[in-house]
Image: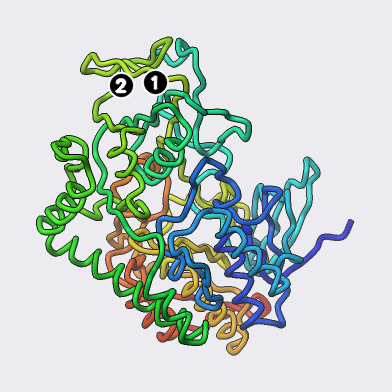
């Protein structure tokens, strides 16, 4: 069987992969591409997670694509609405016809002599080989087949059911049940009010508090603008408003952390029952936005705490028991179901094994360039979004810049491109400079970033608009080579 060749091979058919395909079609219509998706459906995160209440924690006017207006009344949207939006985007643009499901990329080997990647794929147990001029990895940064669950003493004693949100059973009946949700991040604060509507009682058990802010599920300004302006214009205005708002909250948190702490505490106190121990359960030890802040649409978590259908406990687990959990304080929490909303396992590039001219690539030895390429790795781009605002804001800019890079290579007659460090001992710092537990567990296995642009992975949308959209593609740190003429165009 002949090996198929494409110009660009996109790994992942989630929000990043569909976005990358759109920009490729729009700006590089002469290039062939294919999207490989390991699972049986598109949508990435929004198809994988099936736990009750799953929704975005960013507004869809910024989490959505710049080129496709979000027109639903709900700004904080549930997974089904997001999936409809993503699949509609793919269908409208013919992208869905380029997706190959149940195609898991196993390895990718770069050949400088041939100026291409040879990609080995597992398709339902059968090997498939595809060659590509470029790989664009849009697989996110966590493992789709495995969530993180710490080791719990006595776990085997528990006679009820233990569930991780990443693997939620479709037939789980929790009606009238006592449920303990372990965790305090975005997944936990989503699950608690969703489960409380049918459960007997839900307890959110947290080791330490997280910053939680109530936000409206509908954007009144956006919905009003849509009634009086064309959809595209209304969307652009709303998107810019929300970009500025997100950045302002982050900037204030960084510059005036004490004031922001006081504001969040006061907001929480107004939402909670009278005499509720706010500081015990809603006063983190870190500053706002040292970790990603959780939002709860229309204050739904606080409503469950007010009406008594849910409660929050801040303590450490001593052991699981037959009937629940015993805490270090000695208190026991009874449970029929325990949900371990304890986080993700990080995994860049979908766990694909990379080699360059026969030498394995160690990601930990690489440095990110412009937040989209790796030092000394040719013809490979990737998409990782913002951690301090909507993920997709960054992805759109990266995809635009990628298509501009391809055009630049055509102009100068190059078919190989890779970043090169200005000095082997260039100072670096962690790629994800973020305090979340799932980041800390994997930080030693990830690439690093530099201290200044272009080696700094920017988390500032306005700065990236200037650098990635408005700035030049060429850079003193980029090497452009022709495989037919061993020559560097720099």
Between 432 and 76, which is closer to the camera in this rendering?
76
Residue at point 45%, 35% (across, down) = 148
Which mark is on residue 152?
A: 1
Residue 387 left/right relative to 267:
right
Residue at point 54%, 82% (across, down) = 404
Spot occupied by residue 456 in the image (x, y as percentages of width and height): 33, 67
Residue furthest front as drawn: 307
Categorize mark 1 by other alpha carbons within 10 Å: few (<14), some (14-19), many (20+): few
Sequence-wise, which precedes: disc 2 or disc 1? 1
Between 369 and 400, which is closer to the camera in this rendering?
400
| Residue 115 can be seen in this image | no
Q: Is residue 235 above or below residue 305?
A: below
Between 330 and 465, which is closer to the camera in this rendering?
330
Spot occupied by residue 335 in the image (x, y as percentages of width and height): 41, 20
Number of numbered callouts drawn: 2
Dots 2, 1 in contact, CB < 8 A: yes
Spot occupied by residue 97 in the image (x, y as percentages of width and height): 76, 66
Residue at point 32%, 45% (across, down) = 436
Label 2 sits on a secondary structure element that is: strand
What is the distance, in whole Å, between disc 2 and disc 1 at their CAs? 8 Å
Spot occupied by residue 264 in the image (x, y as percentages of width and height): 19, 53
* 2 vs 1, front mark: 2
Q: Is residue 305 above or below residue 240?
A: above
Reading the image, the residue beneath label 2 is 317
């Amino acid at each position: 069987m002949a090996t198929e060749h494409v110009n660009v091979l996109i790994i992942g058919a989630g929000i990043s992969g569909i976005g990358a395909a759109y920009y490729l079609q729009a700006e590089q219509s002469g290039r062939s591409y294919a999207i490989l998706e390991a699972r049986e459906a598109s949508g990435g995160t929004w198809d994988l997670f099936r736990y009750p209440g799953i929704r975005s924690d960013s507004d869809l006017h910024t989490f959505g694509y710049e080129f496709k207006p979000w027109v639903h009344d709900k700004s904080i949207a549930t997974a089904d609405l997001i999936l409809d939006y993503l699949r509609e985007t793919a269908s409208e643009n013919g992208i869905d016809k380029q997706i190959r499901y149940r195609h898991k990329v196993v390895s990718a080997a770069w050949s400088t002599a041939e100026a291409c990647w040879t990609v080995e794929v597992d398709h339902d147990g059968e090997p498939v080989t595809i060659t590509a001029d470029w790989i664009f990895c849009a697989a996110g940064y966590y493992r789709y087949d495995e969530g993180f669950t710490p080791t719990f003493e006595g776990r085997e004693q528990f006679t009820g059911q233990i569930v991780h949100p990443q693997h939620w059973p479709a037939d789980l009946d929790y009606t009238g049940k006592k449920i303990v949700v372990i965790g305090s991040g975005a997944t936990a604060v989503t699950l608690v009010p969703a489960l409380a509507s049918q459960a007997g009682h839900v307890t959110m058990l947290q080791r330490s508090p997280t910053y939680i802010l109530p936000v409206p599920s509908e954007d009144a300004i956006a919905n009003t603008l849509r009634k009086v302006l064309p959809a595209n214009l209304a969307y652009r205005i709303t998107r810019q408003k929300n970009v500025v708002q997100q950045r302002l909250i982050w900037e204030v948190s960084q510059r005036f952390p004490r004031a922001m702490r006081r504001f969040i505490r006061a907001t929480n106190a107004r939402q909670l029952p009278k005499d509720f121990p706010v500081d015990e359960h809603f006063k983190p030890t870190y500053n706002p936005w040292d970790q990603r802040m959780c939002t709860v649409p229309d204050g739904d978590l606080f409503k469950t705490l007010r009406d008594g259908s849910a409660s929050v406990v801040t303590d450490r687990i001593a052991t699981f028991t037959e009937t629940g959990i015993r805490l270090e304080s000695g208190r026991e929490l009874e449970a029929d179901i325990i949900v371990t909303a304890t986080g993700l396992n990080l995994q860049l590039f979908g766990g694909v094994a990379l080699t360059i001219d026969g030498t394995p690539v160690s990601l930990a030895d690489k440095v990110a360039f412009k937040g989209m390429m790796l030092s000394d790795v040719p013809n490979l781009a990737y998409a990782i979004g913002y951690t301090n605002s909507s993920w997709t804001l960054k992805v759109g800019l990266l995809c635009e810049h990628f298509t501009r890079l391809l055009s630049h290579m055509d102009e100068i007659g190059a078919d190989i491109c890779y970043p090169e460090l200005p000095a082997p001992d260039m100072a670096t710092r962690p790629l994800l400079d973020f305090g979340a537990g799932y980041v800390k567990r994997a930080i030693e296995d990830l690439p690093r970033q530099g201290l200044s642009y272009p080696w700094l992975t920017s988390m500032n949308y306005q700065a990236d608009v200037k650098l990635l959209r408005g700035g030049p593609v060429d850079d003193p740190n980029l090497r452009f080579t022709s495989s037919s003429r061993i020559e560097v165009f720099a």
